[in-house]
Amino acid sequence: MAQDIQTFDTIIIGAGPGGSAAAYPLATTQKVLVIENDLWGGTCPNRGCDPKKMLYSAVEVRDRARNLQGSGLNGLPAIDWPELMAFKRAYTDHVPADTLSGLKAANIATVHGRPHFISENQLKINETIYQADHFILATGQAPVVPNIPGHEYLQTSTDFLNLSELPERIAFVGGGYVAIELANIAASSGAEVHLLQHNQHILRDFPEDYTQLLSAAMTTNGVTFHWDTELDGVTETDDGLLLTTNQKMLEVDAVFVAMGRQPQLATLNLAAAKVSVEDKGLVVNNHLQTTNERIYGVGDVLLKKQPKLTPVASFEGRYVAQAILNDKVAPITYPTIPQVVYASPQIAQVGVKLDFAKEHADQYRIVAQDVSKWYTFNRIKEPTARVTTIIDQISNLLVGAVVYASIAEELINDLTALINQHTTQEQLSQQIMAYPTPASDLTYYYG
Ligand SMILES: Cc1cc2nc3c(=O)[nH]c(=O)nc-3n(C[C@H](O)[C@H](O)[C@H](O)COP(=O)(O)OP(=O)(O)OC[C@H]3O[C@@H](n4cnc5c(N)ncnc54)[C@H](O)[C@@H]3O)c2cc1C
Ligand SMILES: NC(=O)c1ccc[n+]([C@@H]2O[C@H](COP(=O)([O-])OP(=O)(O)OC[C@H]3O[C@@H](n4cnc5c(N)ncnc54)[C@H](O)[C@@H]3O)[C@@H](O)[C@H]2O)c1
């Protein structure tokens, strides 16, 4: 029987934000195939950013109401978990089918399956061989699950975002974005929440002054932090799950690990395609080419210093599409990338890091402001709001910021635009912003 061989210009593996962002511009002139082995749309819309923020919608409204108790509001709304989950599912249930029909409508071929390379320009799924001039690896990451006794009881963020009922007692292991955001949602929704962190720092990318403010606020909101605590094992009891740690024992009803994520590359047989891989991800050059120059990588699967976020994956996907269509494209340069932790309140940062600015005081002016009493924050009775901006000493331009406030997500985007557009305080003062809004405060962040 003749071998089934299908030929494309570009084959993309992974239909998340990175792979999809590359597929659409390529398909305007090329024959493109996207291969996905799980849910079309990838992590962000199915089991990441979007479902997380659907659940957070109720949390932020409740936070606002809590802050206004005694200032015109009486009584705190209670979160109804099954209803909130139904609201989330009404969004996520459509994502795979909508993603697939979007790809098909753009004339992009699609295959559901798990490919492995058999040569530098061919891969195989079942009995079919797919070959192309270029490939894009956009396979993202999956949660790390430690191989400890009782690992079968460990759940991940994907399970949490699908819980039909909220367990009464929950433990999260880890102190990164995922553990903090999900612990905050669970506590606001009425669960008894424990967070086990193996050292004494949460959110290691963010300045410690700010993360300590957040852990104090979360403690007030009912989260118990267990510092310097390592999970050694889990056993089932009559009442729940018993967690054995290097500190004390703890009984809960569910335990979710959020100890970081690892690249999904193991099944691709990349050696056959002469692509080098490290444990922490795919090695690429400044054109996002792997060690096989016709095979590119984008998104979370990369070994890179940029944060692993949806808009970064999409930016890289669009860049690689241009690189494939025009081999003279310049090396990738990233704009300033904002990071937001959606907790109660939010922490956000962008640009030059605060610790770096402190170490280079001759280069940067640091404007640290407690803005709790400013009109914008007082109006919503924000208990603590802080904004630190970092100004270049010579140009007087804004180059970095950290925000601790319930509206940090909006403010950080405004500050990011000022940084990227090199806007001076004088230029900003020539603009008229709607008042009173967070944007009408912007000139005051130049100090
Ligand atoms: C709980 C959670 C919350 C998050 N919240 C935010 C947020 O608020 N904001 C933000 O910017 N980012 C957030 N992120 C990160 C964001 O989801 C990722 O940065 C983004 O999805 C990366 O896109 P990607 O295309 O690189 O990878 P992914 O979205 O992971 O897509 C990769 C795709 O490849 C597929 N795949 C993997 N291996 C194979 C294979 N061998 N064959 C075929 N297909 C394969 C996968 O099934 C998946 O569909 C969050 C992540 C998590 C887990
Ligand atoms: N709001 C957002 O933008 C958002 C939200 C969620 C996730 N994300 C993305 O997803 C990525 C993954 O998030 P994450 O929270 O899983 O990872 P993370 O890298 O942010 O945090 C991992 C945490 O686990 C801890 N840890 C590591 N090894 C451990 C061990 N052996 N025992 C106990 N704890 C250990 C670390 O100290 C850290 O606190 C993030 O880095 C980010 O790129 C972004």
Image: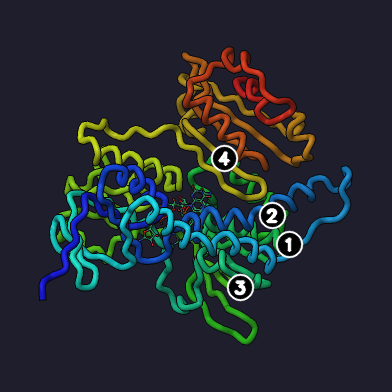
Residue type highlighted by circle 2: Val
Check disc 1 and report the residue beneath it: 79
Residue type highlighted by circle 1: Ile
Mark 1–mark 2 CB contact (< 8 Å): yes
Image quadrant occupied by the C terminus: top right
Badge nearest the viewer, 2 or 3: 2
Dot 1 or dot 4: first in sequence order is 1
Badge nearest the viewer, 3 or 4: 4
User: Within the displayed image, which quadrant is ligand 1 positioned in?
Assistant: bottom left
Dot 1 or dot 3: first in sequence order is 1
Residue type highlighted by circle 3: Leu
Percent across and percent down for residue 383 are 75, 41
Dot 1 or dot 2: first in sequence order is 2
Residue 289's disc is: none
Badge nearest the viewer, 4 or 2: 2
Q: Is residue 199 visible?
A: no
Check disc 3 and report the residue beneath it: 250
Residue 59's disc is: 2
Dot 3 or dot 4: first in sequence order is 3
Percent across and percent down for residue 231 are 50, 69
Residue type highlighted by circle 4: Ala
The local secondary structure at tag 1 comes to loop
Percent across and percent down for residue 326 are 23, 35
